[in-house]
Image (spheres, rainbow, N blue to C red):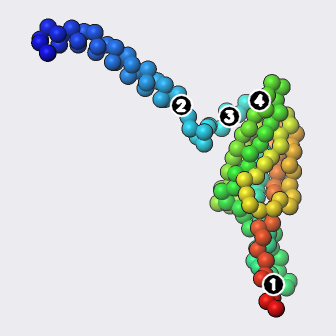
Amino acid sequence: MTSNRLQAFNLVMRPALLGALCLVTAACGAYAFPGDRPSPTPTSSMGTVSGTVLSVPCAPVEQPGTTCAGRPVPKMELSYTCDQTTAQRVLSTTTDSNGHYSIQLPAGRCTVKFNTYMRYISGPLTLQVKAGDNLVANYVFDNGIRVPAPQQ
Protein backbone atom coordinates (compact mmCIF):
# COMPACT_ATOMS: atom_id res chain seq x y z
CA MET A 1 0.00 0.00 0.00
CA THR A 2 1.12 3.47 -0.64
CA SER A 3 1.47 5.97 2.13
CA ASN A 4 -1.69 7.87 1.10
CA ARG A 5 -3.78 4.70 0.90
CA LEU A 6 -2.53 3.59 4.32
CA GLN A 7 -3.48 6.93 5.85
CA ALA A 8 -6.95 6.77 4.27
CA PHE A 9 -7.38 3.20 5.55
CA ASN A 10 -6.38 4.26 9.09
CA LEU A 11 -8.80 7.22 9.03
CA VAL A 12 -11.79 5.12 7.93
CA MET A 13 -11.24 1.62 9.26
CA ARG A 14 -9.61 2.23 12.63
CA PRO A 15 -12.71 3.95 14.16
CA ALA A 16 -14.98 1.27 12.64
CA LEU A 17 -12.88 -1.55 14.07
CA LEU A 18 -12.73 0.11 17.50
CA GLY A 19 -16.50 0.60 17.47
CA ALA A 20 -17.08 -3.05 16.55
CA LEU A 21 -14.71 -4.17 19.30
CA CYS A 22 -16.61 -2.07 21.86
CA LEU A 23 -19.93 -3.61 20.78
CA VAL A 24 -18.58 -7.15 20.98
CA THR A 25 -17.06 -6.48 24.41
CA ALA A 26 -20.30 -4.99 25.75
CA ALA A 27 -22.36 -7.88 24.37
CA CYS A 28 -20.05 -10.50 25.89
CA GLY A 29 -20.24 -8.89 29.31
CA ALA A 30 -24.04 -9.04 29.28
CA TYR A 31 -24.20 -12.77 28.55
CA ALA A 32 -24.51 -15.26 31.41
CA PHE A 33 -24.24 -19.03 31.05
CA PRO A 34 -27.42 -20.90 32.14
CA GLY A 35 -25.82 -22.34 35.31
CA ASP A 36 -24.35 -18.98 36.29
CA ARG A 37 -27.60 -17.13 36.87
CA PRO A 38 -27.28 -15.05 40.01
CA SER A 39 -29.74 -15.52 42.82
CA PRO A 40 -32.41 -12.87 42.95
CA THR A 41 -31.65 -9.92 45.16
CA PRO A 42 -33.67 -10.19 48.37
CA THR A 43 -36.50 -7.70 48.50
CA SER A 44 -39.49 -7.14 50.71
CA SER A 45 -41.54 -9.41 48.42
CA MET A 46 -39.21 -12.37 49.01
CA GLY A 47 -39.04 -15.05 51.68
CA THR A 48 -36.21 -17.34 52.75
CA VAL A 49 -36.54 -21.12 52.63
CA SER A 50 -33.80 -23.20 54.20
CA GLY A 51 -33.33 -26.69 55.56
CA THR A 52 -31.41 -29.94 55.43
CA VAL A 53 -31.54 -32.89 53.03
CA LEU A 54 -30.81 -36.32 54.55
CA SER A 55 -30.74 -39.87 53.20
CA VAL A 56 -31.49 -43.14 54.99
CA PRO A 57 -30.47 -45.82 55.84
CA CYS A 58 -26.99 -44.95 57.01
CA ALA A 59 -25.54 -48.42 56.42
CA PRO A 60 -26.66 -51.74 54.93
CA VAL A 61 -26.80 -53.28 58.41
CA GLU A 62 -27.54 -51.10 61.42
CA GLN A 63 -26.62 -52.44 64.83
CA PRO A 64 -29.44 -53.15 67.33
CA GLY A 65 -29.94 -50.28 69.74
CA THR A 66 -28.44 -47.68 67.42
CA THR A 67 -30.42 -45.26 65.40
CA CYS A 68 -29.42 -43.12 62.48
CA ALA A 69 -31.38 -40.00 61.71
CA GLY A 70 -29.86 -39.92 58.24
CA ARG A 71 -26.73 -38.87 56.39
CA PRO A 72 -26.41 -35.40 54.85
CA VAL A 73 -26.81 -35.28 51.06
CA PRO A 74 -24.19 -32.94 49.56
CA LYS A 75 -24.51 -31.28 46.15
CA MET A 76 -28.21 -32.07 45.61
CA GLU A 77 -30.01 -29.58 43.37
CA LEU A 78 -33.42 -28.32 44.50
CA SER A 79 -35.46 -26.46 41.86
CA TYR A 80 -38.39 -24.33 42.98
CA THR A 81 -41.10 -23.37 40.49
CA CYS A 82 -42.96 -20.34 41.82
CA ASP A 83 -46.29 -19.15 40.48
CA GLN A 84 -46.36 -15.41 40.01
CA THR A 85 -49.11 -13.20 38.66
CA THR A 86 -47.65 -12.99 35.15
CA ALA A 87 -45.63 -16.22 34.73
CA GLN A 88 -43.85 -19.05 36.46
CA ARG A 89 -40.32 -18.58 37.72
CA VAL A 90 -37.80 -21.37 38.40
CA LEU A 91 -35.06 -20.83 40.98
CA SER A 92 -32.48 -23.41 42.02
CA THR A 93 -30.09 -24.03 44.88
CA THR A 94 -27.66 -26.80 45.83
CA THR A 95 -26.99 -28.36 49.22
CA ASP A 96 -23.59 -27.84 50.82
CA SER A 97 -21.32 -30.60 52.19
CA ASN A 98 -23.53 -30.87 55.32
CA GLY A 99 -26.78 -31.18 53.34
CA HIS A 100 -27.88 -27.62 54.19
CA TYR A 101 -29.40 -25.18 51.71
CA SER A 102 -30.96 -21.72 51.70
CA ILE A 103 -32.74 -19.83 48.93
CA GLN A 104 -34.64 -16.58 48.46
CA LEU A 105 -38.04 -17.19 46.84
CA PRO A 106 -40.70 -14.74 45.68
CA ALA A 107 -43.91 -14.53 47.69
CA GLY A 108 -46.49 -17.02 46.43
CA ARG A 109 -46.93 -20.75 45.91
CA CYS A 110 -43.73 -22.67 45.12
CA THR A 111 -43.26 -26.37 44.33
CA VAL A 112 -39.94 -28.18 44.62
CA LYS A 113 -38.33 -30.83 42.41
CA PHE A 114 -35.14 -32.74 43.16
CA ASN A 115 -32.35 -33.75 40.81
CA THR A 116 -31.52 -37.17 42.31
CA TYR A 117 -31.76 -40.90 41.80
CA MET A 118 -33.00 -41.37 45.38
CA ARG A 119 -36.63 -41.96 46.34
CA TYR A 120 -38.39 -39.08 48.10
CA ILE A 121 -39.67 -40.00 51.59
CA SER A 122 -40.70 -36.82 53.39
CA GLY A 123 -40.71 -33.03 53.35
CA PRO A 124 -43.03 -30.37 51.92
CA LEU A 125 -43.32 -30.47 48.11
CA THR A 126 -45.39 -27.26 47.99
CA LEU A 127 -44.69 -24.14 50.04
CA GLN A 128 -46.70 -20.98 50.50
CA VAL A 129 -44.05 -18.27 50.80
CA LYS A 130 -44.94 -14.89 52.28
CA ALA A 131 -42.88 -11.72 52.11
CA GLY A 132 -40.30 -11.71 54.92
CA ASP A 133 -40.89 -15.40 55.80
CA ASN A 134 -38.12 -17.65 57.11
CA LEU A 135 -39.43 -21.13 56.37
CA VAL A 136 -37.71 -24.41 57.23
CA ALA A 137 -38.22 -27.29 54.80
CA ASN A 138 -36.28 -30.48 55.62
CA TYR A 139 -36.26 -33.46 53.26
CA VAL A 140 -35.51 -37.17 53.67
CA PHE A 141 -34.68 -39.60 50.83
CA ASP A 142 -34.19 -43.36 50.59
CA ASN A 143 -30.69 -43.95 49.17
CA GLY A 144 -31.32 -47.63 48.35
CA ILE A 145 -28.60 -49.13 50.57
CA ARG A 146 -29.75 -52.69 51.35
CA VAL A 147 -28.23 -55.95 52.56
CA PRO A 148 -27.77 -58.30 49.61
CA ALA A 149 -30.37 -61.05 49.41
CA PRO A 150 -29.01 -64.51 50.32
CA GLN A 151 -28.08 -66.63 47.30
CA GLN A 152 -29.94 -69.93 46.95
Question: Looking at the picture, which amino acid does disc 4 mark?
Answer: Ser
Q: Quadrant of residue 110?
A: top right
What label sits on residue 44 in the rendered view? 4
Cα distance in 3D space between marks 3 and 2: 17 Å
Residue 46 visible, this orientation: no
Which residue is the site of mark 1?
Answer: 149
- Who is closer to the viewer here, 137 or 33? 33
Residue 143 lies, in percent from the top left, at 76, 67
Q: Residues within 10 Å of mark 3 (few under 14, many from 20)?
A: few
Q: Contact, CB < 8 Å: mark 4 with mark 1? A: no
- Who is closer to the viewer here, 109 or 17? 17
Question: Looking at the picture, which amino acid does disc 3 mark?
Answer: Pro
Cα distance in 3D space between marks 1 and 2: 53 Å
Marks 4 and 1, the one that precedes in the sequence: 4
Q: Quadrant of the N terminus?
A: top left
SS for callout 3: loop
What label sits on residue 101 in the rendered view? none
Q: Residues within 10 Å of mark 1 (few under 14, many from 20)?
A: few
Q: Nearer the viewer, mark 4 or mark 3?
A: 3
Marks 1 and 2, the one that precedes in the sequence: 2
